Image (tube, rainbow, N blue to C red):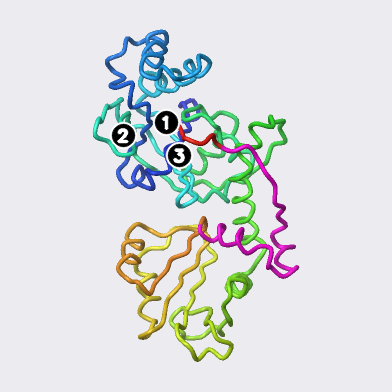
Amino acid sequence: MRDTTIWGVHMARDHDLRPIENGYIAIGWHKVGDLSSIAPNRDAFKAKVAEAYPEKKPGAIPVNAGVIYRFALEMKVGDIVIFPSKPNRMVNIGIIEGDYQYVPDAPVRCPNRRAVKWIASVPRASFSQSALNEIGSAVTLFQVTTHADEFLAAMEGDAFEAQDIDEEVSAEQVSLQVEESTEDFIIKRLKANQTPYQFEHFVAHLLKCMGYHSRVTQASGDGGIDIIAHRDELGFEPPIIKVQCKQILTTIGRPEVQQLHGAIENGEHGLFVTLGSFSPDARTFERTKPNLRLIDGPILIELIYSHYHQFEPRYQMLLPLKRTYIPGPAIGGHD
């Protein structure tokens, strides 16, 4: 399998986890239309992109044309594909199962599609930072070569040791990757540098920074409740918030969420905090319960950013962060 081509793909955030749930990868450039109707050569693809997007700068046309050319003609059934999904912070690895398809009514204006059999979903924190940098390319579709063995081992379920490789990267690459690198750093520190009990105290401290009084419960038959939080100092005034914490990187399903909700009494609220993610079924259950909130890794990171300036020194030492500015996307978006 080492000789198999490995592709990395980035899809619009609006896809959420539908590519994983429904077994596909998809890219945009919807104005170009059905790629199978274009003559199978790069010049024809460049001409089609220039016709469909007359506002594009000449230098961008070969890049865009190259992406859709590779997607339609160079990707083959049996090739491996890597898709880093932002909503659950997982690296999804699968095998291309179908030839190019044009789906004109596809969501998110991404009609160019290929069927994929997803083999493994591995937490980002399991990989070396240099491997994550490789799949953090700013291009929609690209080949993965330098860390291929690391991703293949993850797909096959083999044990692997993440090895970071020192490499020179351009300022542009750094600015594109720094946001995800910082998120990876935070999750890794919260996972590797704390015990589960210390993580509960960290969450309790975050709640205090948000204006709540909170206390960590003693380990007992408390239905999985790790923290009790409330607005008033004595804890008499509603609402009372019961918090469960899971210092794990994998996906939490509906049964565990239901168990927490079952421990909530009338007038109380439930909060489930994890470094990983929640299954679609768990999210569906959350939407039916107004007194329940699920906090996954990405949401937890946003809360940390918002309240970091209030952290006690020990937690700022745990997560040494510095505010900075980096180049961002132009206003108006793109395909």
The image quadrant that residue 258 belongs to is bottom left
Inter-mark Cα distance, 2 to 1: 21 Å
- 46, 88: nearer the viewer: 46
Q: Could you tell me the amino acid type at mark 3?
A: Phe
Side of 15 relative to 203 (left or right): left
Q: Position of residue 167 (x, y in %)?
A: 71, 32
Q: Position of residue 235 (x, y in %)?
A: 53, 89
- The residue at the point 60 percent across, 50 percent down is 184
**Compared with residue 259, is residue 68 higher up or lower down, i.e. above or below?**
above
Mark 2 surroundings within 10 Å by alpha-carbon count, few (fewer than 14), some (14 through 19), many (20 or more): many
- Residue 115: which numbered mark, if any? 2
Residue 318 part of the magenta-drawn span: yes
Side of 195 relative to 43 (left or right): right
Q: Position of residue 77 (x, y in %)?
A: 34, 27
Side of 40 relative to 126 (left or right): left
Quarter holding the C terminus is top left
> Of discs 3 and 1, which sits in the foreground?
1
First in sequence: mark 3 vs mark 2: 3
Residue that carries the numbered disc 3 in the rendered image: 83
Inter-mark Cα distance, 3 to 1: 18 Å
Q: Which residues are magenta?
A: 299-328
Q: Position of residue 133 (x, y in %)?
A: 60, 38
What SS does tag 2 mark?
strand
The image quadrant that residue 195 belongs to is bottom right
First in sequence: mark 3 vs mark 1: 3
- The residue at the point 33 percent across, 21 percent down is 32
Q: Could you tell me the amino acid type at mark 1?
A: Asp
